[in-house]
Image: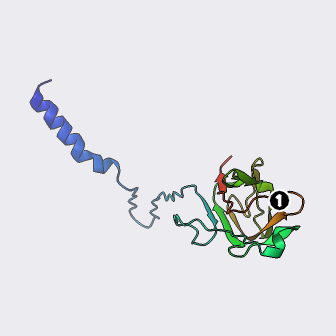
Amino acid sequence: MNKALLLKTTLALALATPLLASAESQLVTGTGTATARLNLQVVIPGFIALKVGTGAILSNTNTVDLVNFVLTDPQVGVDGNIAATSGGVVPVQLLSNIGNVNFASTGAALTSGPDSIPLSQIAVASAGTLPHPAFGAAATTVTPTSGRTINRTSNWTFSYNHQGATAPVGAGTYTTQVTYTAVAP
């Protein structure tokens, strides 16, 4: 095949391609009924959105909230639950459209120099439809609220089980960071 014929053939195919993708049509003469069909398609991507703390769901925010416990002098030497002095009620929300989601939390002990407080001494009460996952435990399955969608919200209230009389720790500012994960199974 010569180059001129190949070029003409390629050009003819390129010009005819829009005709191959044309819409359906029907011509009826007289008093008949003409029909034509149209395919519709909506593509919705799957997503998981998790918000822990302040900020808006469905946005990327890099602000990490702080739950702070500042003990008073009388609390230091006794055992008991201590309410947070700031940030103790944390709003959370989980949205998804993919069906079940595995939900977990991980974190290390709170440390100040060589001293540490086990994360197990932090308790979390949940008011709402999204329970707090146990620190360091296997992921829990969050099931859809309708169809394959999840829309769960809660307020988590944190408290510290201080062991000032039975297992005292040294003075200091003890810190750690907890990571919450929501993932498709």
Residues 171 and 52: in front is 171
Residue in the picture at 9% in, 31% down: 4
Relative image position of residue 26 (x, y in whole percent): 40, 58
**Relative to 114, 127 lies left or right:** right
Residue 88, percent from left and from top: 72, 72
Within 10 angstroms of label 1, few (less than 14), some, or many (20 or more) residues?
A: some
Question: Residue, x 90% and y 59% (percent of image)?
Answer: 166
* Of residues 24 and 66, the one drawn nearer to the viewer in this rendering: 66
Residue at numbered disc 1: 168
Q: Residue at x 46, y 61 (%)?
A: 35
Asked whether, in this view, residue 43 is left or right of residue 18, the answer is: right
- Which quadrant: the N terminus? top left
User: 19 or 78: which is nearer to us?
Assistant: 78
Q: Residue furthest top?
A: 1
Total of numbered circles in the picture?
A: 1
Q: What kind of residue is marked 1?
A: Pro
Residue 173 placement (x, y as % from top left): 67, 63
| Residue 104 in sight | no
Residue 11 quadrant: top left
